[in-house]
Image: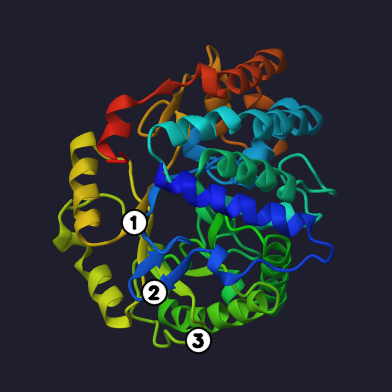
Amino acid sequence: MKNSTVLLTILAALCCLACSPKQQDLPKEAFMHVNGPDIIAPDGSKFFIKGTNLGNWLNPEGYMFGFRKTNSARMINDMFCEMVGPDFTAEFWKMFKDNYVTRADIEFLASVGVNTLRIPFHYKLFTDEDYMGLSSGQDGFKRLDDAIGWCRESGIYVILDMHDAPGGQTGDNIDDSYGYPWLLESEASQQLFCDIWKKIAEYYRNEPVILGYDLINEPIAPYFNNMDELNAKLEPLHKRVTAVIREVDPNHIIMLGAPQWNGNFEPFSDTTFDDNMMYTCHRYGGDASVAAIQNFIDFRDRVNLPMYMGEIGHNSDEWQENFCKAMEESNIGYTFWPYKKLHNSCFMGIRAPENWKTVTDFSEAPRATFFEVRAARPDQESARQAMLEFIENCKFENCIAQEGYIKSLRLK
C-alpha cells in the first residue's frame, strides 16, 4: 500500500530524531501540506482523503445510543447519574473509552481501505472540568496517543477535530453547549480555546501521522436572530487560534469549518493568513450529484485551497456510492459519519443490549424535578446490567460489519 510506504519513511525519520543527541523538529517535508487545491503527501504525491469519523468515542452523542431527548454528552452523563449513580457512571465511561475504539478497530478500518480518520474530541478532555467520569487528570492525550499509535501502525492518517469547544461553538446538542454559541462572544472561552489548541499543537508538533487540525466543528447553527453578526466573528477567531498554533507548530495543516453546519463559506474573505490551510464542508441528505456541492467547488476554485467533506452519511448505500463518485470527480476527499453506533448506517453496528429499553425509556421520561426522577427510575441492577452489556456489545469482535455500507464508500 502506497500510504504505508509513506508512513514507514516517516517512522524512520522519527527513529533518527529520537536517537539524535539533541532533539530537533522534523523538517516540513515530513508532513502533509497544501499545494493549491490539493493535499500533498511527504513523498510528493497527491493525497485524497477517504475514511470515517470516530464519533461518540470521545464526544458522546445521544442518537448513537438510541436516545432522542437526551442528546448531548452532558445530558447523557446526567441521565446515567440519575439512573445508576455517579460512581457507576464514572466506571461506565472508563470502560466505554477503553473498549469503543481499540487497535482491532483501527486494523479493520485499514483493511477495508480507510486512509484517514477524523477523531472528534471534547475540549474538556484537556482540562480539569467534569467529563466522562473524570474531574481531574483528564485523559485526552492518552486517548489520542493510543489512537494515533494504532493509526501509525496501520498506515492511516489522523485529523484532530475539536467537536465541542469552550462555551459552545454551535449552540445545539452536537457541541454539548447550553443552546447558544457562547464561544463567539466570550473572551474567556476564546482564550481557553486558544490555550488548548496550543497545548495540543505543541504536544504533537513532531507527529506527521496527524494530517491536520480541524479547529471548530460546525460553528454557529442557523437558529439565531443575530446569525450574521456571529458569522462575522468566526474568521477573526480562526486567525487568532491559527496564530497561536503557529507559535509552536509550523507544519500541520489548519482546517477551517464554515458556519451553518460547515455549509456557508460566504463570511470568509481572507484566505491568505496562513500558507498551509484548507477548508472543510459537511453535508447530509439531498441530491447525490456534483451540482449539489457546486457552492463548495466554486469556493474552493476561487480561493485555490483544498476542500474536504469532513462529515457525510446516514443514507442509502446507492446514494452514498453515487455521492462518493461525485466527490471524487470534484477532488473533495471525505470522511463519513460515523464509524460505529447502535444498529446500522455506519461501518460497525452495535447490537442493542437485551434490556436497553430500560435505559432508553428513562432517557425519554420527564426528569425535570427530583420527584419525576424518582418516579421514572428503573430497577438499578437491571439498568446497570444493560449498560455493562452495551460495553460488551460495542467491542470490535461483537459488532456487525455493515458490508453494503462499507462497499458504497469506494475506499478501494
- Image quarter for residue 124? bottom right
Q: Position of residue 199 (x, y in %)?
A: 73, 65
Residue in the image at 27% along x and 81% along y: 302
Mark 1 → mark 2, Cα distance in angstroms: 15 Å
Label pair 2/3, CB-CB below 8 angstroms: no
- Determine whether 34 is above or below 48 in the image: below
Mark 2 → mark 3, Cα distance in angstroms: 15 Å
The quadrant of the image that shows the C terminus is top left
The circle drawn on residue 35 is 2
Mark 1 → mark 3, Cα distance in angstroms: 23 Å
Can residue 38 be seen in this snapshot? yes
Q: Position of residue 357 (x, y in %)?
A: 51, 19
Label 2 crowding class (10 Å Cα cut-off): few <14, some 14-19, many 20+?
A: some
Q: Which residue is mark 3?
A: 273
Label pair 1/3, CB-CB below 8 angstroms: no
Residue in the image at 53% along x and 27% along y: 360
Q: Which residue is mark 1?
A: 333
Inspect the image, locate mark 3, and give the three-letter code of the amino acid beneath it: Phe
Inspect the image, locate mark 1, and give the three-letter code of the amino acid beneath it: Gly
Q: Position of residue 239 (x, y in %)?
A: 55, 82
> Closest to the observer: 331 or 90?
331
